[in-house]
C-alpha cells in the first residue's frame, strides 16, 4: 500500500487546532508534532524553541478517497489560516516501508526538567548520573514528550511521583507519563485511555521500559469519560457540566493523578477526578490553553479541589490541585 504524508508548518498557538483537524483524517488519528529544535552544545540533546513554527504531519492511505481528503484538509487549513499563521499544505507519497519509519526522522533525545530524559527507542543515549531515562516508541499515539503540555507534566512528576504513591495517568496516549511516574518511584500506576491504538502503544512502551510490574495499561476512563470517544475526536459524550452523576462510581482512589487532556475534557471530568483523588493527594492537569484556564479553575473549585500550583509555558498551562 502507498501513503500520503500531509504536512504543514503552523504558529505554535495553532498547534492544538491543527492537530485536532489532522487527527480527524489521519490514519488512526495519528499526528506527529515536530517542534522547532535548537541543538545542544554537545551530544544528541536538543531543546524546544517555542519562538519558531512547529511542523505537523499525518498520514492517509493513497486510495480513491485520498484526493478528496487532501482537498478537505487544505480547505480547513485555509480557514484556520485566517486566524493564525498556517503554512502551505505539503504532500508527498510514501511506500509502505518508507511510511513505517517516516515519522521517526523527526524525533530527538529530549531532556525535560532536572532529571528526566526522553529517548526515542531507535536512538542511543548514554545516561548520566541521576538521569531518569524514559524510552519511547510513540507509534501513532499522542504523547511523545515533545509538546509543552507533556513537558510541564514531566517536570511536575519529578516532584510529586514519590515512592509509595498510587498513581493514575488518564488519557495516557503513548504511556509517557505513567512510565515516568514509575521510573521516578511511584506505583502501582494505572494508565487509562479510551483509544485502543493508544492502549496498544502504551503497553508496548511499558514493557520497553521494564516497568510492567508497576504499570497496568487498560482501555477506559473515569466516570463521564467512559461515554466519550478519544478526546481528539471531538466526541465528548453527554458533556455533563460537572459529571456529578458519575462521580460516585470510581472503584479506586489514587495519591497522584496525571491528566494531560484538554480544557473541555478536564471540565467534564472535574467531579470524577476529585472523587478518584485521595485526600492530600496531588492532581496534575495540563493540556490547558490559556484562554480556557478559568473554565478549568472554576470546575475544579466547584468539585472541591484546592489549587496549589500553576505553571505556564507559552500559551499552555499546567495546574496542581489537592483535596
Image (cartoon, helix red, strand yellow):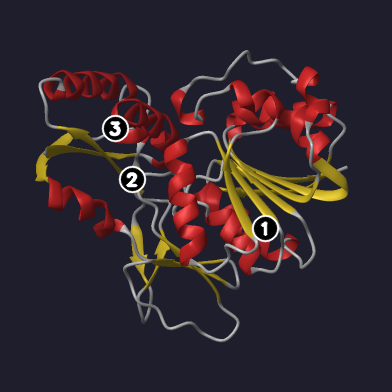
Quadrant for the N terminus, please. top left
Residue underneath mark 1: 156
In the rendered image, residue 175, in percent from the top left (x then y), is placed at: 52, 52
Which image quadrant for residue 132? bottom right
The residue mark sitting in front, 1 or 3, is 3
* Alpha carbon separation for disc pair 2 and 3: 10 Å
Is 57 left, or right, of 234 in this rendering? Answer: left
* Alpha carbon separation for disc pair 2 and 1: 24 Å
Secondary element at tag 3:
loop
- Dot placed on the residue nearer the N-terminal end, 1 or 3: 3
Quadrant for the C terminus, please. top right
Residue underneath mark 3: 26
Q: Is residue 89 visible?
A: no
Secondary element at tag 1:
helix
Is 156 left, or right, of 47 in this rendering? Answer: right
For disc 3, the neighbor class at 10 Å (few under 14, some 14 to 19, many from 20) is many
Residue underneath mark 2: 32
The residue mark sitting in front, 2 or 3, is 3
Residue lying at the far front of the rendered structure:
213
Going 21% across and 24% down the picture, which residue do you hit? 74
Going 62% across and 57% down the picture, which residue do you hit? 215
Amino acid at each position: 500500500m502507498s501513503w500520503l504524508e500531509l504536512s504543514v508548518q503552523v504558529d505554535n498557538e495553532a498547534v492544538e487546532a491543527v492537530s485536532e483537524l489532522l487527527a480527524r483524517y489521519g490514519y488512526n488519528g495519528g499526528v506527529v508534532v515536530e517542534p522547532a529544535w535548537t541543538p545542544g552544545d554537545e551530544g544528541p540533546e536538543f531543546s524546544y524553541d517555542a519562538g519558531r513554527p512547529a511542523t505537523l504531519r499525518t498520514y492517509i492511505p493513497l486510495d480513491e478517497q485520498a484526493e478528496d481528503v487532501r482537498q478537505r484538509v487544505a480547505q480547513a487549513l485555509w480557514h484556520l489560516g485566517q486566524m493564525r499563521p498556517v503554512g502551505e499544505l505539503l504532500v508527498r507519497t510514501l511506500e509502505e516501508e518508507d511510511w513505517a519509519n517516516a515519522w521517526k526522522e523527526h524525533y530527538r533525545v529530549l531532556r525535560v526538567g532536572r532529571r528526566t530524559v526522553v529517548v526515542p527507542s531507535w536512538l542511543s543515549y548514554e545516561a548520566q548520573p541521576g538521569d531518569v531515562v524514559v524510552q519511547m516508541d510513540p507509534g501513532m499515539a499522542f504523547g511523545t514528550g515533545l509538546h509543552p503540555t507533556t513537558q510541564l507534566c514531566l517536570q511536575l512528576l519529578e516532584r510529586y511521583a514519590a515512592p509509595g504513591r498510587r498513581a493514575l495517568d488518564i488519557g495516557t496516549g503513548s504511556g509517557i507519563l505513567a512510565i515516568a511516574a514509575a521510573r521516578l518511584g511511584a506505583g502501582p500506576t494505572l494508565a487509562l485511555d479510551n483509544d485502543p491504538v493508544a492502549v496498544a502503544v502504551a503497553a508496548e512502551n511499558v514493557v520497553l521500559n521494564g516497568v510492567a510490574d508497576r504499570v497496568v495499561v487498560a482501555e477506559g476512563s473515569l466516570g463521564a469519560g467512559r461515554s466519550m470517544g478519544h478526546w481528539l475526536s471531538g466526541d465528548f459524550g453527554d458533556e455533563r457540566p460537572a459529571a456529578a452523576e458519575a462521580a460516585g462510581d470510581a472503584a479506586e482512589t489514587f495519591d497522584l493523578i496525571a491528566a494531560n487532556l484538554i480544557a473541555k475534557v478536564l471540565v467534564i471530568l472535574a467531579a470524577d477526578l476529585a472523587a478518584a483523588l485521595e485526600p492530600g493527594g496531588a492532581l496534575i492537569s495540563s493540556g490547558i490553553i490559556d484562554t480556557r484556564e478559568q473554565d478549568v479553575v472554576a470546575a475544579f473549585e466547584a468539585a472541591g479541589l484546592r489549587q496549589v500550583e500553576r505553571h505556564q509555558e507559552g500559551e499552555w498551562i499546567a495546574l496542581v490541585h489537592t483535596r
